[in-house]
């Protein structure tokens, strides 16, 4: 599944191209990929114009002039491909569909616009979906009510970060970082990288972190996420940026997928272990395990 920087990269690309375009028609091949009532589609999608493209956690939102929005979850193998007479780009899983003739066998939903351009939602594994809902009701969905704050939000302070982590004070810090109800959008790559940056061992219990470590982790996480966005995401397995180019963050990663290599900070060999059920990369010198309290 894409992490926050990958979805943010997709959002930025769509926001450049979609606003102002008016939907003329929609086709879909599977109700699971497009679970919407025909009456709602006719009234609130057809002839509606795109107002803005935003993101919440790992979900894309296309706001429409009808006061409805399309909610898009790419899941594991989703793509969004835009075609017009003057522009073409693909974002998401880098299969041949990014550059091939569309629609193809992976195309689940096609939005056609009045200017002749189209947006294709492709999904090989059929786990993703495109939902049409009233914009005012979106934040009341269970998913959005449960998901934590955006770690890069300007008003998200280190104190708020600390307080949210302390909700699970008896859990190890890596597990808590991966919990989407605590903070939104952080996945395995960025958890490992931010813990390395803050010199925190991933098995450290949240209750054993002092104010200085909370501040260091807050700063490290935001820096890592912003760098990845600037570099177009990780493209660790399947994600490319909004113009079809692979993200370059992994070339700048310090520990993730670098087991057996020297730590760029101290020279100690990076190791891979398992924490919170996930493969975990760390420097055993920079990130020493902390003795638990209590």
Image: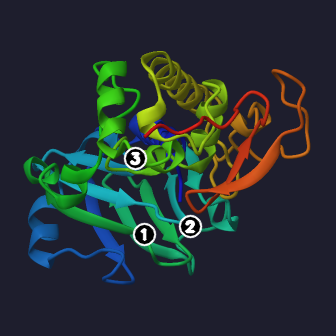
**The quadrant where residue 28 appears:** bottom left
* Number of marks: 3
Circle 3 or circle 1, nearest the eye: 3
Categorize mark 1 by other alpha carbons within 10 Å: few (<14), some (14-19), many (20+). Answer: many
Residue 273, relative to residue 33: is it above or below?
A: above
Residue at (63% x, 41% y) in the render: 192
Q: Which mark is residue 77?
A: 2
Categorize mark 2 by other alpha carbons within 10 Å: few (<14), some (14-19), many (20+). Answer: many
Q: Is residue 104 left or right of residue 281?
A: left
User: Element type at marker 3?
Assistant: loop
Q: Is residue 111 left or right of residue 125?
A: left
Residue 274, relative to residue 286: is it above or below?
A: below
Indicate how the structure is coloured in the image.
rainbow
Disc 3 from disc 1: Cα separation: 34 Å
Which mark is first along the chain, 2 or 3? 2
Residue 81 image position (x, y, % from top left): 52, 56
Categorize mark 3 by other alpha carbons within 10 Å: few (<14), some (14-19), many (20+). Answer: some
Disc 2 from disc 1: Cα separation: 8 Å
Disc 3 from disc 2: Cα separation: 35 Å
Whether residue 241 is visible to the viewer of this picture, yes or no, is: no
Residue 127 image position (x, y, % from top left): 45, 75
Residue at (37% x, 45% y) in the render: 57
Residue 255 image position (x, y, % from top left): 76, 38
- Kindly check if marks 2 and 1 are in contact, taking CB atoms under 8 A apart as contact: yes
Residue indicated by mark 3: 170
User: Element type at marker 1?
Assistant: loop
Residue indicated by mark 1: 128
Circle 3 or circle 2, nearest the eye: 3
Residue 294 image position (x, y, % from top left): 43, 40
User: Element type at marker 2?
Assistant: loop
Residue at (30% x, 69% y) in the render: 26
Residue at (51% x, 26% y) in the render: 217
């Amino acid at each position: 599944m894409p992490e926050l920087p990958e979805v943010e990269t997709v959002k930025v690309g769509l926001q450049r191209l979609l606003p102002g375009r008016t939907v003329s028609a929609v086709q879909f091949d599977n109700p699971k990929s497009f679970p919407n009532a025909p009456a709602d589609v006719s009234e609130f999608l057809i002839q509606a114009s795109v107002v803005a493209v935003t993101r919440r956690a790992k979900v894309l939102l296309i706001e429409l002039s009808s006061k409805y929005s399309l909610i898009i979850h790419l899941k594991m193998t989703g793509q969004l491909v835009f075609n017009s007479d003057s522009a073409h780009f693909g974002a998401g899983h880098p299969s041949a569909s990014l550059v091939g003739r569309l629609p193809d066998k992976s195309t689940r939903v096609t939005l056609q616009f009045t200017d002749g351009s189209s947006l294709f939602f492709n999904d090989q594994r059929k786990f993703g979906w495109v939902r049409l809902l009233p914009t005012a009701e979106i934040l009341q969905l269970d998913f959005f009510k449960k998901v934590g704050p955006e770690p890069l939000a300007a008003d998200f302070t280190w104190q708020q970060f600390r307080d949210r982590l302390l909700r699970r004070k008896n859990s190890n810090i890596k597990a808590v970082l991966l919990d989407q109800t605590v903070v939104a959008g952080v996945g395995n790559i960025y958890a490992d990288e931010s813990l390395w940056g803050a010199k925190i061992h991933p098995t450290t219990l949240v209750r054993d972190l002092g104010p200085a470590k909370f501040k260091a982790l807050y700063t490290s996480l935001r820096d890592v996420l912003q760098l990845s966005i600037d570099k177009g995401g990780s493209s660790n397995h399947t994600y490319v940026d909004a113009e079809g180019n692979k993200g370059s963050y992994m070339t700048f990663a310090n520990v993730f997928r670098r087991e057996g290599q020297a730590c760029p900070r101290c020279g100690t060999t990076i190791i891979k272990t398992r924490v919170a059920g996930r493969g975990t990369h760390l420097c055993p010198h920079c990130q020493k395990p902390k003795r638990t309290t209590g």
